[in-house]
C-alpha cells in the first residue's frame, strides 16, 4: 500500500517483553482479529504491509482474513511508535502524566510524532530513558507557525541525518536552529503571521516613462533575451554554515527538489528517500483521494470509518450493531403477525430510533480485507 491507516497491538506484541518485535496491523485486522486487544492508533504510514498473523506476532495470533502469510515483510519500516511511544521524550499519547495539553505533529521523513513544544530540541537534548525523560523540556526561542502556512514538517533529527535537506531551508516558512543568527537568516515571511501582523503586498513605484516601456515591449524592444543558463544544484552550492533545525515546509516544496543525476543516485536513492519525489506520497494526497473517489456503499463506509479516530470507530460499530439488533426485533413482530412491512413502517422505526438516541446514527461496515 502506498499509504494506509495502521495500528499496533500491544497485546500480541508486548513492548517490554524480551522477545518483542514491532509489528503493525491494518484497519480490517484491528476489528476482525484483534477485537478487545490493547491497540495503539498510528495514523497513516507509507509502503507498509499488514503483519497480522506473521512471525512478528507471538503466541496463537492468526490472521482470520488472510491465514497464509510470509513470516516477514522485509520492506516494512518500524519506529518507536510501534511500541506505543512518541517524540524525543519517548512517551505515550495521550500521556496521563503530562499536565501540558499539546498537539502532536508528524515528521514527513521518519513519520514519528512530536509534541509541538519539543520540536525545537534534538534527540541528544533529552534523556533516552523513558522513565527519566524530561517532558517539560522546551526551547524558549521556538514557536510553531500557523497550520495553514505550511504543509509538511521535517524534524531536526531527520535534518541532521540528511544534511542535504538544509539546502532547501529557503522553502520553509520558518527554520528552528540553535544558532539564532542562522535561524533568522532562513526565515521566510508568511502573509498574516502573528509576529509581524497582516502583511501588505509590495507596491512598485510608477515612473513617468512606464507607458514608453510598455510600448517598447509591444514592439519587441526591451524584451529580455532567453538564457540557457543551467540551474545549479542547491545541494552542491549550499552553505557549510547552515545549521540543522526543524523545518516547516510550504505547500509545493517537493516540486522544487533538485532532480539532477547526482541527487537522484547519491541523495534520494542512497538514503532511501525516493518517496520525496512521489507526489502521491503525501498525506494530503491520501486524504484528497479518499474524498474524491466515489465507490460502492461498502467502499464509502470503509473510507468514512478509516477517517475516524479509534474511539469514534468503536462508537460507530457499536451504534451500527445496536441499530441492527433493534431493527431485527422490530421486523420480527411483523413476521410473527404475518404483516407486510411498508415504507412508512421503516420511517417510523428510524424516527423513533433518532428520537431515542438524540441524533442520527450513520450505519457503517466492518472492513473485511487485510492490506
Image: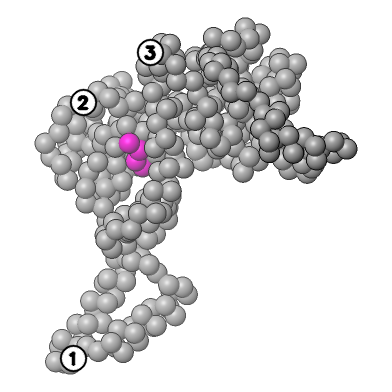
* Position in image of residue 320 (x %, y %): 32, 66
Residue of label 2: 72
**Residue 19, above or below 309:** above
Which residue lies at the image location 73% right of the left edge and 26% below the top edge? 140
Query: Closer to us: mark 3 or mark 1?
Result: 3
| x and y percentages locating residue 173 in the rendered image | 65, 31
Apparent side of residue 130 relative to residue 347 in the rendered image (left or right):
right
State the residue at coordinates (23%, 76%). Answer: 328
Mark sitting earlier along the chain (2/1)? 2
Circle 3 is placed at which residue position?
Answer: 265
SS for dot 3: helix
Q: Percent position (x, y) of residue 202?
A: 79, 38
- C-alpha separation, residue under disc 2 versus residue under disc 1: 55 Å
What is the secondary structure assignment of the residue under circle 2? loop
Tell me if residue 227 comes above or below residue 92 in the rendering: above
Residue at point 72%, 20% (across, down): 185
Span of residues in magenta: 2-6
Amino acid at each position: 500500500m502506498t499509504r494506509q491507516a495502521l495500528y499496533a497491538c500491544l497485546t500480541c506484541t508486548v513492548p517490554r517483553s524480551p522477545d518483542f518485535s514491532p509489528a503493525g496491523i491494518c484497519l480490517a485486522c484491528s476489528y476482525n482479529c484483534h477485537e478487545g486487544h490493547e491497540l495503539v492508533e498510528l495514523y497513516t504510514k507509507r509502503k507498509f504491509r499488514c503483519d497480522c498473523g506473521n512471525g512478528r506476532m507471538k503466541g496463537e495470533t492468526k490472521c482470520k482474513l488472510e491465514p497464509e502469510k510470509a513470516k516477514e515483510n522485509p520492506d516494512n519500516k518500524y519506529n518507536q511508535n510501534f511500541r506505543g511511544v512518541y517524540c524525543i521524550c519517548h512517551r505515550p499519547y495521550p500521556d496521563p502524566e503530562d499536565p501540558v495539553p499539546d498537539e502532536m505533529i508528524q515528521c514527513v521523513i521518519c513519520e514519528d510524532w512530536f509534541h509541538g513544544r519539543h520540536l525545537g530540541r534534538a534527540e541528544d537534548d533529552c534523556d533516552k530513558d523513558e522513565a527519566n525523560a524530561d517532558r517539560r523540556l522546551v526551547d524558549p526561542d521556538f514557536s510553531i507557525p500557523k497550520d495553514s502556512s505550511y504543509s509538511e514538517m521535517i524534524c531536526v533529527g531527520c535534518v541532521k541525518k540528511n544534511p542535504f535537506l538544509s539546502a532547501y531551508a529557503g522553502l520553509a516558512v520558518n527554520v528552528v536552529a540553535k544558532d539564532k543568527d542562522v535561524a533568522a537568516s532562513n526565515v521566510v515571511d508568511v502573509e498574516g503571521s502573528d509576529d509581524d501582523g497582516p502583511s501588505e503586498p509590495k507596491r512598485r513605484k510608477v515612473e513617468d516613462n512606464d507607458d514608453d516601456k510598455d510600448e517598447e515591449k509591444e514592439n519587441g524592444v526591451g524584451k529580455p533575451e532567453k538564457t540557457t543558463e543551467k540551474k545549479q544544484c542547491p545541494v552542491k552550492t549550499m552553505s557549510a554554515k547552515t545549521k540543522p533545525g526543524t523545518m516547516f515546509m510550504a505547500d509545493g516544496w517537493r516540486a522544487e527538489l533538485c532532480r539532477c543525476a547526482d541527487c537522484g543516485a547519491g541523495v534520494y536513492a542512497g538514503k532511501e528517500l525516493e518517496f520525496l519525489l512521489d507526489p502521491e506520497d503525501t498525506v494530503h494526497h491520501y486524504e484528497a483521494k479518499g474524498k474524491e473517489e466515489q465507490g460502492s456503499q461498502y467502499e464509502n463506509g470503509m473510507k468514512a470509518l478509516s477517517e475516524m479516530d479509534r474511539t469514534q470507530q468503536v462508537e460507530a460499530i457499536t451504534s451500527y450493531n445496536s441499530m441492527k439488533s433493534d431493527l431485527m426485533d422490530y421486523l420480527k413482530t411483523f413476521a410473527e403477525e404475518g404483516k407486510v412491512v411498508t415504507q412508512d413502517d421503516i420511517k417510523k422505526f428510524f424516527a423513533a430510533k433518532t428520537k431515542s438516541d438524540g441524533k442520527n446514527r450513520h450505519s457503517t461496515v466492518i472492513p473485511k480485507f487485510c492490506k
